Amino acid sequence: MKADKNLWILVFVCVINSLGFGIIVPVLYTYGKLYGLTGTTLGLLTACFSIAQFFATPVLGSLSDKWGRKPLLVISLLGTCISFLMFAEARSLIVLFAARILDGLTGGNVSVAQAMVADTATASNRAKRFGILGSAFAFGFVIGPLVGGTFNALSPQAPFFFAAGISLIGTLLAAFLLKETNVTTKETRLNGQYNFKFSALATTLKRKTVGTAVFIGFVLTMAQFTMIIGFQTFSVDILKISPAQMGIFLAGFGVCGIVMQLCVPFFIKTFKSKKLILMLSTIFCFAAMFLSGLNSLLIPFAVCLCVYGLFNGLRNPMLNAIIADNIEQNEQGKILGINQSYASIGQTLGPITAGLTALVSVHCIFFLSSFYILIAFLLSFRLKSNS
């Protein structure tokens, strides 16, 4: 019962945190233009966060193995809060970059939250709990842009002050209400195995099941962010829909993912195997992306996007559960942090490859995304049969 209470507090913290990030998405470029941000530097601003997160997240995860999850989660949330305040008070482009780098360096909240779930979960309910946590993050991303647009009407700085405020609330909730799930002692902290080495970023990939799951997550993240670029260009250049309609589209995509993540217990009960569920989800995602590239009509495109959104929602709960099932308690934070590191690079490489593919055709972006998904499907055969 206590573990369930902790889970729901953690879910609430995650909703608040992802809401803060979602709030700034629709206003970031417009606000940055006040200080000289361009389309090119927007890409660099996005990339600097992902690069900083790539190096920092596994370190924070490893530290949470040594010192406990709670203090590292509090630090991560506080870093996000400070970065939003830096945005609100920025007077130059350099400060905007510094704020995003700070947020990336302290951006271990996702992996630490996942490690807290893994600490108290069992093999039978781990995927369900990851699904609940994933839906919490997704919910904040869905409603965040709407809130951000509303506050932007007050002033350009208002969305960032509001995001900082709710991030502070999340920090306080984590500090005073969450229970530590990885209690450590002086003796355990002196154990040398907690010292993180960046070589682990490579050696983790060599572990058959864990490394395969991490790499599948990386490839599927690239596929998703490739699709997002394709969606934006396809919607504007081919479908000719308005930004408001695009917002509805993206909200619908997010809701589909939330619904599917909440249905994880049904899939686990029906199919038993996380590997099989992952393989089925990638098949449907592949078909949806490939068919998206073949049409130029609104309704078929919307149906394909809905199917992709639904089955893509199964990706993270299954992969995180497979990873957690195959690692030791004292490396949960480190490995889940490494998993998040590769996901952050996938978020960067996806848009880059999509942009290059767009030079050929907008439709080819969806074919590229489906190619990534096909690779992930083939790699999933390497996972343990009883995963």
Image (cartoon, rainbow, N blue to C red):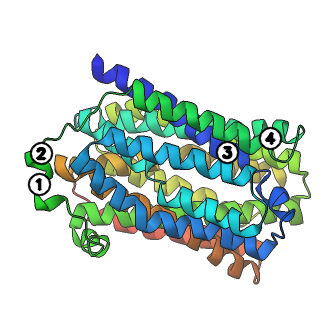
Label 4 and label 3: CA atoms lie apart by 14 Å
Disc 4 to disc 2: CB gap under 8 Å: no
Residue 22: mark: 3
Secondary structure at numbered mark 2: helix
Q: Amino acid at mark 2?
A: Lys
In this rendered view, identify the residue nearer to me: 82 or 113.
82
Q: Nearer the viewer, mark 4 or mark 2?
A: 2
Label 1 and label 4: CA atoms lie apart by 45 Å
Q: Quadrant of residue 81?
A: top right
Residue 190: mark: 1
Label 1 neighbour load within 10 Å: few <14, some 14-19, many 20+: few
Residue 371: mark: none
Left or right: 241 in relation to 281? right
- Residue tagged 2: 186
Q: Amino acid at mark 1?
A: Leu
Label 3 neighbour load within 10 Å: few <14, some 14-19, many 20+: many
Label 3 and label 2: CA atoms lie apart by 39 Å
Q: Amino acid at mark 3?
A: Gly
First reached walking from the N terminus: tag 4 or tag 3: 3
- Residue tagged 4: 158
First reached walking from the N terminus: tag 3 or tag 1: 3
